[in-house]
Amino acid sequence: MLKAVFFDIDDTLYDTSGFAKLARNAALDMMIDAGLPLTTSEAYDLLREIIAQKGSNYDKHFNVLTKTVFGEEKPLLIALGMINYHNVKFALLRPFPRTTSTLIDLTSKGYRLGVISNGITIKQWEKLIRLGIYNFFEEVVTSDEVGFEKPHSRIFEEALNRMGCKAEKSIMIGNKFNEDIMGAVNAGMSAILVNSQLTKEEKDLIEKEKLDVRVIADISDLQKIL
């Protein structure tokens, strides 16, 4: 019988991609109104390139943006972008509609819940707190503190050790096949893919290797499966 259920955060417990796009566009519009000589579309494409190059956990994307456009950083524009981004982000930050009820249901059935996330520890805790779901999780394990990112087995092993659970009695829920699903499977855990679709190659791999992997359309489906 399963004892521990681990979750990814971004695009698993809440709509990271959707709210991030809205928040970034709002920030860029504010910067453009204050003198950034780009259209919203041009600024957004440039910002995406910077995020892809620097990584989503880098905290000076707007600094790089202004330096790229002007040849130097523009403190006023950077501050306007950062403040508007965070204001919109926090206003929109909500769990997926059935996330909280699913966590309540799993907890009531005796499952122990944890988080395994690639990211900066404080930022991941901040998300869980603002989502209003941090108190459901016994452990929040991040790549920032472990020193290894999913799909490396070390981060999964650390999470299992902290929870005092065996891999074969634990399951990982996430939206990324390689990082969440294969990372967990290679660590000896079961896994469920949510909010994502398998490619033909991924389906073939699951069938060929007879992997303990399932796919669900909504996080609330966990209540039926588990």
Image (tube, grey):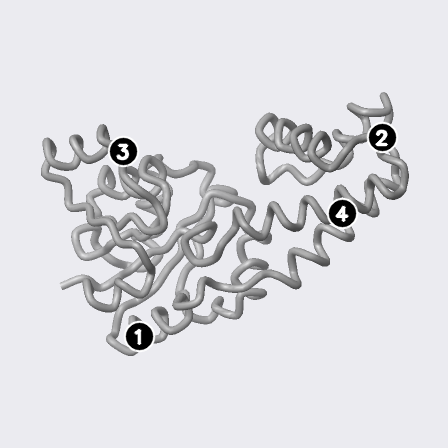
Residue designated by label 1: 105
Q: Is residue 22 left or right of residue 95?
A: right
Residue designated by label 2: 37
Front residue of 102/196: it is: 196
Which quarter of the figure has residue 114? bottom left
- Please name which of the two marks, 2 or 1, marks the residue nearer to the observer: 2
Contact check, label 2 and label 1, Cβ < 8 Å? no
Looking at the image, the residue that sits furthest to the bottom is: 108
Mark number displayed over residue 82: 4
- Please name which of the two marks, 3 or 1, marks the residue nearer to the observer: 3
Which quarter of the figure has residue 56? top right
Q: Residue at x 56, y 58 (%)?
A: 127
Q: What secondary structure is found at the residue carrying circle 3?
A: loop
Contact check, label 3 and label 1, Cβ < 8 Å? no
Q: Is residue 44 left or right of residue 139?
A: right
Percent position (x, y) of residue 73?
85, 30
Against 17, residue 178 (above or below) is: above
Estimate the spatial distance between the alpha carbons at disc 3 and disc 1, rounded to whole Å: 31 Å
Q: What secondary structure is found at the residue carrying circle 2?
A: loop
Estimate the spatial distance between the alpha carbons at disc 4 and disc 3, rounded to whole Å: 36 Å
Q: Earlier in the sequence, mark 4 or mark 3?
A: 4
Estimate the spatial distance between the alpha carbons at disc 1 and disc 4, rounded to whole Å: 37 Å
- Residue type, mark 3 in image: Thr
Q: Residue at x 32, y 51 (%)?
A: 194
- Residue type, mark 1 in image: Asp
Q: Earlier in the sequence, mark 4 or mark 2?
A: 2
Estimate the spatial distance between the alpha carbons at disc 4 and disc 2, rounded to whole Å: 18 Å
Q: Residue at x 48, y 63 (%)?
A: 95
Residue designated by label 3: 199
Q: What secondary structure is found at the residue carrying circle 4?
A: helix
Which quarter of the figure has residue 130? bottom right
